[in-house]
Amino acid sequence: MGLLSILIFLPLIALALILVLPSTVKASYKYISLVFTLLQLGISLYIYQNFQGAQAGVNSLSDFQFLEQVSWIRLDLGSIGKLEIDYLIGLDGISLPLIVLSSLVMLMGIGASWNMNKSPKGYFALLMLLNTAVMGIFCALDFFLFYVFYEVMLFPLYFLIGIWGGERREYAAIKFFLYTLLGSVLMLLVIVGLYFSVINPESGAHTFNMLHMMNPANYVEGSFFSFIGNYHEVFGVPARLIGFIILFFAFAVKVPIVPLHTWLPDAHVEAPTPVSIILAGILLKIGGYGIIRVCYSIFPDMAAETNWWLALIGIISILYGALNALAQKDLKRMIAYSSVSHMGFVLLGIASLTAEGLSGAMFQMISHGFLSAALFFLVGVIYDRVHDRYIYHFRGLASIMPKYTACVAIVFFASLGLPGFSAFIGEAFVIIGAFNAESMATGIPRWMAIAGSIGIFLSAAYFLWTLQRMFFGQTRLQGGTAWQSALTDLNRRELLVLVPAISLALILGIMPSLVFGKLNASILKLIDIINPYL
Amino acid sequence: MHTSITNILDQIINSVPLLKPELALIAGFVISIFSSLFLTKINKHSTFIATLLTLVVVGYLLVEQLGQTEVGFANFWIVDPISTYARIIITIAALVITVFISHRHSKNNGDVYSILLAAILGTHVLVSTSNWLLVFIGIEMVSIASYILVGYFSKNKVQAEAAMKYALFGSVCAAIMLYGLSLIYGLTGELNFQATTHLQGLMDAPELIVSLALLFVLVGIGFKLGFVPFHLWTPDVYQGAPTSITAFLSTIPKVGALILFTRLFQAWSSTDFYFSELLEWYVIIVALATMLIGNLAALRQQEAKRMMAYSSIGHTGFLLMAIYAYQDSSAFLFFYISAYVLMNLAAFLFINQLEQQTGSTTISSYAGLGKKMPLLFTAFSLVCISLVGLPPTIGFIGKLMVFTALFDFTGEYNNTAVILLLIVGALTSVISLFFYFRIPLYAFLRKSEQDTDQKITPNILLCIGYTFTVLLIFLGLFPSLLIDLFN
Amino acid sequence: MAVPIILIIVSFLTAFYIGRLIWKTFFGNFRFAEYLDREHRLHEAPTLMLAPMLFLAFCCLAPLFSLHPLDYHSSWLMQGLHVQTTFPAMPSAHLYIPVVLTIGAILAWLIGWKWYIKHQYPFSQENKLILLANNQFYINELNERIFVKGIKRLSTSLYFIDRKVIDGLVHLFTNFIQSLSRAMHWLDKNIIDGIVNFVASGTYYLGHLVRHVQNGQLQGYLGFALTVLILGFLYLIIK
């Protein structure tokens, strides 16, 4: 049992504990969750400390760290061959930052659910299950294992949104589930296709090992997804392209890109605050991570071929999300759309195929991870107090909630990409990457970089406008004096959740090397893989 | 015609050991009739115990037959791994259903057991033969037994109507099939569909008649399997029949018909002649239509049993896909069948428990019960997840293996049919999520209108249900344990 | 070459007005006596002020910088400020420029002594140049009129442009962005989400259609099944 396995399955122990304990001690559930998530954070920080940034990983198994490989399923299917599935987990520079982020955001989520009174047993149990699934996704290197974690993640989310959500929770929950499932069942077909196209060079059997899938030498000649001389077509589209598109589609739903994003505002708005935090902070990153780990690493040729379109989608997401955010009157919905916009930068950065762009995309994911978590938490604060999030119902909050206003202002400024904060580094790197792409001949025109910067401008517009509308001016509240007394300033628990996120945004803004140092080698390796196909 | 009578007798006598499990069934059948007539007064559980013992003995005899590949009674009777595995699955399912019936209908149930045994004998015939005559006998044995089972406990008009519909629809289908069989026999002069003379006869015959005969024969199999367009009886009958019988209908006869169809498809699809292609196309179209219609129609169902009927139609479509992709190894087919049986039995066990608790099988009656019966509904939700085919359950592995088999199928990747099957197979599982998840939706997400403060008393059926649920997950994580049994 | 000469002339002028200051303040008649009333006494400055003054005065003395009056190199200040220049230094300049300056300064003082102490002031008060000099050559007025007022006027007009034209454009842009965002929101809600919901409800409706056959009538079922059968058969015939 390696450290990563402990990290992944620790929440399951918490889950078992929570389920076993009778509901007479229901106050203990949150403490159990807290202790286990803290433990997880400790482990992930330990892993971070001991991670060798120089080892690239990506497509060579030996370069992965904290590697664990146990043969799991060996099915003999006669003439179809043997199904070879391993329990294979490991970390490289791409997954490590996300692991640390996940454990941190999970902790924020637990902190945000401190006052959860509605059937806490199920709530914390599902949260722990979700935690396991999320950790598993980022660690899995076997496609089957990855898929299992990927799907297992959906059930707790369905129930978390569906049971503890807002008014239209049923709609939001099933919409979210169906959307993701649509992507993932099609992904399953591609996984099966890849399985048949790839052979484990050591055992000669077909394999689900993702790293074997990244090596062109392992492809069976003439197989469906074979690298060289692939003449297979599905409805006139080359097989590898269609495989890439389907995988991209599956992950793009998660990112989400326009026009596959419509589950997001609904899910975010209806979900309870902690779930919104986890959704925005971790789950959107699975999309970006999947694109890097799966689409780009396994289909580098198609990545090089399609990056113009991907960048275009990124640009559309940035602008479209920002414009939509500007039109929102519900604060949570506005932040949900801002997520769409910010995740567009991730896609643009990935598609730029430059070291700056890809590092920027990774950095943007990390930065957006805790910034959006902080944003949703801040929305949760006023929603908890007055059960209203309508922007125009609040005015002049600054005078009655000064600490809260300060936090909101800092997080808003950090999110809109003020230099000195993490989002600036991420967005700047993405735009630099996109700008340099033309000179690197990766096929991304300069105007895309410019369009991306318009997105930053728009994000400044909606954040500052909201700040002005809600916090400044004469205090005027929809709910009158009742609200005035209800809207107390941040308490210690809330500050305890927020301060780490804000300080992290600042620390990473000043010392981006904390992240870049660990992921640089992997990014360069990934670009080396894709470069020959440009 | 030179085979002397002694030779024939020798052969028959030599073949008798192959029939051991069936002979045990027949004996059990007789014993249970006897016991229900005379012993019930002494011990009201006597018939139940006799049936259980019979099934255990049958199971033991079947295990003995494992690995055996023999043909007896002049090619009438086949004992091979396919038939043995199928019969073992059937026997296990029958055990559960016997317990189910005894628990659910503890009074006046004497004859049910003997009829159940007769139905099982019928499925044994179906899975162990390639002879049209025996096929027909098998189908009729299962059908007639099923008609009786559906109507046996009928208390109200709906249940009687269901039994009547089932019988009428079944007889029409049987008649059509018989007509098709007579055409085939007339064209080939041979009743064994695996024999070369049979195939030769079909090839020589006029295409029109062969097409007609083929269609007619498939009507009978279609009725038993419940694929489109012969699926129409299923929802009404599943809903009308007592839950224990519905559990029986959705599993045991299906397995029998499925194995029969596999044999038929295997024998006929591998030839180079036109009707192979015809049959392949027939299977593809029927599989597509069955998956789509089954899953789409289930979207609107308000009744759990009716929904399960459509769900089983959908699964039949998926199984047809598996049959289409069938190659030399039957492992994945049996894996899917056992997964299907396991899931369906578990689902019906839970539906039955809820029926006893709330007196209703409508999904809306589950509203808010998740809080009161968390364990039951968690297990039920897991069964639903497995029915959708999501990891980490056995349903997912089954689906994955069918996809795998289909993908590998003949290596022709430009085969539009294969791609269509794959895509529809994948999309229907998305659709199916919607209706399967209505159960957890109502149970956990909705609030209940009335305050039922009933406690569920743990009983053996529920224990079996929970065991099955654990198995669903466990075998989903370690499928090798199950699939290695079929190799 | 012009710069050193101008600097030298300026030094003369400095010497002159410092000389004038000294002659006028400390020599001649005490003309201020009549303005003094009894309460205001003329007295020595307080020590607090005197001390720094003395210190500063002391610091002005040459030996403080260099004990060698002729060699500027020996000054610690120059040593401290020693810079490498690209042009060659002219050591002799350090000799004759101070000499010229000293002579010039003495001359200037002599002129001042003659003008202010001997009252042999050569210019009349009405002299144009004197007036000009008294008014600082009217530079302040020029500055006020041309620059201050002009810029004020310019800024007013620019402010007007800013408010009406540029801000107008900004507002136009803002309004444009806002209406664009509203349009996008509408698009998102009705078209994109609409498509998603349409697909969902379409599928759901399809379920309704498919279910339609299931009317509970056995004859219907058989009719349906057999119709499909016959259609299939017909297809096989005409194929």
Image (cartoon, rainbow, N blue to C red):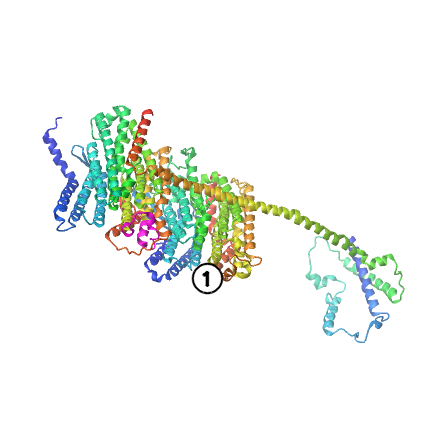
Q: Nearer the viewer, residue B464 or B161?
A: B161
Q: Residue furthest bottom?
A: C38
Q: Which residues are magenta?
A: B355-381
Residue sticking out furthest to the front: B157
Which chain is mark 1 on? A
Q: Residue at x 40, y 54 (%)?
A: A164
Residue at image point 28% right, 40% down: B234
Instruction: Find residue A77 and report its horizontal and vertical position in percent.
Output: 29, 40
Towards the viewer: C94 or A331: A331
Question: Which residue shows up at 66% across the image and 49% down it?
Answer: C162
- In this rendering, does residue A53 appear at all? no
* In magenta segment, residue A446: no
The kind of residue tagged 1 is Arg
Image height of B438 relative to C119, above or below: above
Quadrant (top left/top right/bottom left/bottom right) for the N terminus of chain A: bottom left
Q: Is residue A438 above or below residue A460?
A: above
Nearer to me, B426 or A347: B426
- Is residue C53 visible to the viewer in this orientation of the structure? yes
Residue A198 is left or right of residue B351, and the answer is right
- Count the numbered circles shown: 1
Residue A418 is situated, as x and y percent measured from the top left of the image, at 55, 53
Rendered location of residue A159, percent (x, y): 38, 51
Magenta stretch: includes residue B366? yes
Q: Secondary structure at mark 1?
A: helix
Q: Nearer the viewer, residue B287 or A69?
A: B287
Question: Residue tagged by mark 1?
Answer: A493
Q: Residues within 10 Å of mark 1 (few under 14, many from 20)?
A: few
> In x, y percent, where is residue A504?
49, 56
Taking the image as shown, residue B83 lies to the left or right of residue B294, namely left
